[in-house]
Image (spheres, coloured by chain):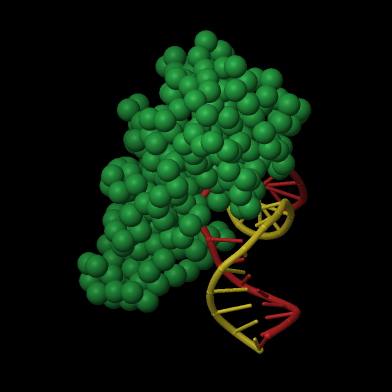
Chain colours: A green, B yellow, C red
Amino acid sequence: MPELPEVETIRRGLNRRVAGRQIVGVVGGGRVLRHNPGGIADLQAFLVQQTIAPLQRRGKFMWMPLRGQDYCLVIHLGMSGQVIWHDATVEDPPFGRHERVRILLDDGSILSFNDQRMFGALTISLLQKDSLGYSFPKIAAHIGSDPLEANFAPELVAQKMCRSSRRIKTLLLDQQIVSGIGNIYADEALFRARIHGLCRGNELSSAQVVDLLEQAAQVMRESIAQGGTSFDELYVNAAGEPGYFARSLQAYGLADKPCVNCGQALQKVRVDGRSHYFCPTCQVESGKI
DNA sequence: ACCGGGACCTGGAAGC
DNA sequence: TGCTTCCAGGTCCCGG
């Protein structure tokens, strides 16, 4: 489900509601805590009585720093994770079908982590500084910067991609090279840049890949402005509401629909195991129009 | 070091 | 109707 725009939408919604609040309890458990050696006891030990600092994000990773501490709670939503904030009520609502962990706050409100498929994770991690002095969770240190970061360097990323024999779509999805892009925004960026996902990195010019990365940044900015992409109930924001960017998609999920540029029917193929939607006229496989 | 494929999960939709 | 198969917004680990 969630790619950069969806994670960013959730982060913004959470910050309005929970930054500055104190954590008074943590309950739940299961597979989403698999990276914590002590399970729920770790979260309780590290979170209870701490004060929430503004949440941060890089790519699809989001983390909650605690005021004055050198560790944080890393939140990764996987395919189906949700973080939903519930206002204070007289009685706590019953656990939902896919609710895994619940964080109780000092004003009686609740942060609830839901995950149907359990690819998501909540993990306590140390914070460490990168070469520029920015603080990142240790467990997310391996991912590359994302296209909406101020210090994102498209030329460097393009250089790396142009040296590879892998499919350009697979390179876009490689979080170590550039983070935040998932299957939806990869297809939208390739469509806008008129590059077929089956092209090899080393078949493309640096200028083409720099443009592709700018298209990715642009489509994700537009999506954030619409609250992200919802196809179903799997993606909702911190208030439990859907996003509206699905109506603006021009490629993803639109097999047999006419291309907005040329009218040709869009097609669907597999690229390294993921579906890829493309226009057979506008996006040529060799990368040379 | 790089690259591709399978594994990890649940549940909804499509096919027989 | 009911069973089976396929598919899904993401990552991680393995063998070649």
Give the x, y percent position of residue A271. 51, 61
Give the x, y percent position of residue A44. 68, 24
Residue at 42 percent of width and 30 percent of height: A17
In the rendered view, would you say A244 is above or below A179? below
Where residue A272 sits, quadrant-wise, is bottom right
Residue at 66 percent of width and 26 percent of height: A43
Farthest-out residue, front: A90
Quadrant of the snapshot with the C terminus of chain A: bottom left
Farthest-out residue, top: A68
Indicate left or right for C14 with A101 as reference: right
Indicate left or right for A197 with A89 as reference: left
Residue at 24 percent of width and 74 percent of height: A263
In the rendered view, would you say A48 is above or below A154? above
Give the x, y percent position of residue A288. 31, 60
In the rendered view, would you say A259 is above or below A181? below
Residue at 63 percent of width and 45 percent of height: A95
Q: Say if residue A32 shows up in the picture.
A: yes
In the rendered view, would you say A51 is above or below B4? above
Give the x, y percent position of residue A162. 41, 44
Q: Nearer the viewer, residue A252 or A54?
A: A54
Q: Say if residue A208 shows up in the picture.
A: no
